Image: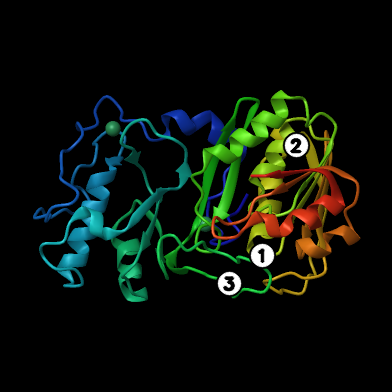
Amino acid sequence: MKCPTCDGDCVQPAEKVLDEIYGMYMACRTCPTDPVFNKGSPFREKFDKETGRCMKCGKRHLDYVIGHVLTLLKDIRFYPVDASLREVGTPLIAFGFHVPYPPRLGSKSLVLIMDSVTKDIADKIIAGVPEIRGVIKRSGSQTQSVGILDTGSTPHLYDLLSGCDMRCDVISASFGELCIYRNQSRIHIEFNNTKIGKIEELYLKGELDNTSVIDGFCGPGTLGLLSAIGGAGKVILNDAWLPAVENTILNIKINSGILGINLDFQKQDHIKNLVGDEPVLMAKASGRAELLVYHGDIRKLGRVAKDGDICLIDTFPSVNPAEYLSVCRDIAKKVVII
Ligand SMILES: [Zn+2]
Ligand SMILES: [Zn+2]
């Protein structure tokens, strides 16, 4: 499947990613040993495209890649000579999972989030450092979530300056695995395994078996799709944030083999309001489970979704989930705050 953002090969089928993920970032037998750099102290080395690169597999250690970016930033005098590796930004591997060793990176395998960068410099990084897939400029503080807090709030976006921001996280639960793609400049960065634990808990108690689950704040679809592989018969995935809904539909397609479903319908003529109001059915899939994807305000979801067994409330950390309790109690017998 072509990447919807850049038309490239960023989006791979879930089965292929899951087959390859455990070896994806591993050093080969010829790879140079791990370098030892103090990431917080002034970095005096000068790295280029070949520094630290393995002659055999062509990959290189994360620190060489960041060191190369830093050299470039210093050469054009954008960063001071005593800047450290840590100051470059937040590197996110393109196929994210808990890598128990320092990753060795191949071509276009890192999305870089930077606080201080311009479009011109981002283009230089993409042109000069082969491992970098995309450069995103962060706005606001690290703790401010990307997306919308509520339908009344102004969307908070990062800026994709160059390359592509599509990346994927491998979600592992005791009963199965999924690949969840997201446009990282428009969707919140997620590292929270306790959320997956809550779905595992429902699964272990048999509470997902053939039930109807409403994932009212679905984001890119993680918990709703996990509920479907955990045995739910019907899942309604809703989000007021259009980029989240678009990523959810992509994730249904990518994981269709694992989910045992086919996409029956996808709305093509939707008015592109970034923030939804009245729920609009955007996609439907069926097979082992029925999946319905809505773009709309959770407060109005009761018009299309009733009599659910479980409603999941997964808001941003700064939002009080209790605000949505009564709305969710109207549409489902049980409400689970994630
Ligand atoms: Zn892409
Ligand atoms: Zn190697």
Residue at the far left in the pictured view: 44
Quadrant for ligand 2 reads top left
What residue is disc 3 on? 155
Q: Between 51 and 333, which is closer to the camera in this rendering?
A: 333
Q: In the rendered structure, which disc, 2 or 3, sits on the residue that comes first in sequence?
A: 3
What residue is disc 1 on? 241
Q: In the rendered structure, which disc, 1 or 2, sits on the residue that comes first in sequence?
A: 2
What residue is disc 2 on? 228
Residue 75 place in picture, x, y as percent: 15, 67
Q: Are marks 1 and 2 in contact (CB under 8 Å)?
A: no
- SS at circle 1: loop
Residue 319 place in picture, x, y as percent: 59, 60
Residue drawn at (36%, 52%), measured in percent from left and top?
Answer: 91
* Up-down relation of residue 46 to residue 210 (above or below): below
Q: CA distance from mark 1 to mark 2?
A: 22 Å
Residue drawn at (34%, 68%), measured in percent from left and top?
Answer: 122
Q: Estimate how packed mark 3 is, as few (under 14), some (14 to 19) or many (20 or more) residues with alpha carbons within 10 Å.
A: some
Residue 28 place in picture, x, y as percent: 30, 28
